[in-house]
Each structure stands twice: as structure tokens, then as C-alpha cells.
Amino acid sequence: MTARLRLLGLMVRPRAAITMWTFLVIGLARHAGPTISTDLVWATIALAASYAVATSMNDIADVQIDRTNGLRDASRPLATGTASVADVRWTAATAGTIAIAAALPLGAPGLAVIGLCLAVDLAYSATPARVSRRWTLAPIALTVAYVALPYLLGIVVAHGAWDAADLPLVAGLCVLFFARIILKDVRDRLGDAAHGKQTLLLRLGKDTTCVVSIVAAAVGIVVIVLAIRPPAPVVVAIAFDAAAIVWMLARLRVTTDPTAELVTIGTAARAGNAVLVAVIAWLLLSAQDAPPMQASLVVATLTAVAAVGFLDLALKPERARVAYKG
């Protein structure tokens, strides 16, 4: 039992779960400002548990692909052979139960959102839907699961209601995330091709995929800025992050070394995370009626801190290490 509980914690995969939680916080900040309650704790647990269901189901579906790709990271227990299919199915069932239980204090709206999360998790990896094998639908499903549903959960935590102003913000966030998620297939293309899994990357090619990603990132950020309408200094800070993303994606187009490709994608993701942090900071500060110049100073400081890490990787990519391979 101890080993299975350890496996349950392992399948949450904190870095990806935190990305989902970031969109939850954006939804919360948009509707409640700095207000925080125990509902945020329950929502965080429910979201993390639902993600463990997603990773468990996907690992079962893609175990052969993961092995072909040489994924030897501890977070891929099926690929490494440290867990059985039965163990991972137990993890999925237990995590699903935890997700539903944690959503109970959130009431019917919270249960509905978590129920949708679990439905997408199953549809993405399990038969008969198996959306992960449909190259046109897979990135859309992931965008809904990572961005739209966590954002809705944030509104639930805020005890708010969807309004017209949410649509452009969610649309911008979704398009920006879409630009990021279509690049995940760069890592997995060898196994995907070997096992007949069609992806946008394999269908359109790397060059076209990079162009789509660049356009989506630029459009997403423009829509986000128009949705939150921050002061000029905040716009400049976000524009700096946008330029960093485009720089890395343009580099990716001409990069041929597999490890360098992954480092470049990770560096672009850092700049994307900086955009999200700037959005959260502005929404929270504006909800507190902070003077625009003070809010701008906070966002500028956060952007400068993020820029240090970004430039360190961008200018010296050889320092990076791909963590998920042994």
C-alpha cells in the first residue's frame, strides 16, 4: 500500500499540475481579487487529483510509445517497469475518488467542473474516444483541460459567475497555451511515428508547426492584453515576454539537435510563464485598486526576475539538463 500511495503522489507531476493551477488562480484573480478561502485548498486538491487520473490513463495508453522514446524518468513508472498496469489503474481510480471528494465542499458548480475534467481525462486516453490519437482534436482537448476548466474552477472558488469579460481572456489564454502544447510532440515524435500515432507535428512538419506556434503565441498575447487592459508599462513588460517567446520559437525552427530542441522549447515556456505571472499580478493588484504606477512597478520587477533565468538559458543553453531522461 505504501508503494501505491507513493505512486499516487508521483503521478501528479508537480510542474504540469502547477501550470493548471496557474490558470485556476487567474480565474480566481479575475473574479475575487485577493480573496482566498479554504475553497482554494479543496480546488487545488481536486485539480491535482484529476490530473493524476489524466497522467495515469495516458501512461497506460502510451506505454509502448514512452519506451520507444526512451523515457526513463521516474514519473513514467510503466515505461521503466517500476509499476504494473494494475498499479496505475488503482492510481487512476483512487485519484478520481479523491478529486470528487475534494470537489464536494465546492458545491454543485465545483463538482460539475471536476466532473468535466475527469470526462476529458478519460476521453483523451481511453477507448473508444481516445482523442490523443486524433491529431486535430488532441491539442484542443489538452487546451480545454489545462486552461479553460481550471479557469472555470477559479471562478467557482471566487463564488463568481461567468460574464462577457471572461471570454476574451480565456480565449487569449487558450490560444497562448495551444502555441505551447503543440510543441510537446517534438519530444515524442520518434515513438509517435513508430507506433502510428498521428500528431500535428508529424502531419504538418516541424517548420509549419513552429510557424503555427509563433502565430498562436502572438495572437494569444495580444488578445490577453486587450482583455485585461493594463497600463502601458505592463503592456511593455508583457511585450518583452512575447518577444522572448518568438525568439525561442524562431530558434526552434532551425535547431536540429534533439536535446537543443527541448531546451529551446523549455526556455520559451519560461517566457510564457512570465506572461501568466504578469497577468496574475496585474489582476490581483487592480482588484485592490492599487495605483497603476505601483502595479506597473511590481509587474516590471517580476518580469526582470524572470528575464534573468530566461536569458541564462537562452544565451547559455548548454547549461540546461533534460530532466526526464536518465
Image: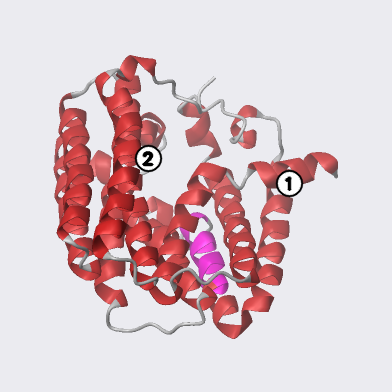
Magenta span:
114-125
Type of amino acid under label 1: Ala
- The stretch drawn in magenta includes residue 118: yes
Q: Residue furthest right?
A: 1
Is the residue marked by circle 1 packed among few (<14), some (14-19), or many (20+) residues within 10 Å?
A: few
Query: Mark 2 belongs to which amino acid?
Result: Gly
Left or right? Give the position of 50 relative to 257. Answer: right
Q: What secondary structure is the stretch in magenta mostly built from?
A: helix
Q: Residues within 10 Å of mark 2 (few under 14, many from 20)?
A: few
Residue farthest to the top, as pictured: 318
Q: Verify CB contact (< 8 Å) between mark 2 and mark 1.
A: no
Residue plotted at (73% across, 58% down): 94
Q: Give the residue number, with chain letter if any, for mark 1.
A: 86
Q: Quadrant of the N terminus?
A: top right
- Please determine whether, in this image, residue 117 is positioned above or below residue 275: below
Image vertical order of residue 265 relative to residue 287, above or below: above
Secondary structure under badge 1?
A: helix
Q: Looking at the picture, how far across and down is residue 152, in whole percent? A: 44, 73
Q: Nearer the viewer, residue 291 or 315?
A: 291
| Residue 257 rendering spot, x and y as whole percentages | 28, 18
Residue under pointer 2: 196
Where 205 falls versus 284 (above or below)? above
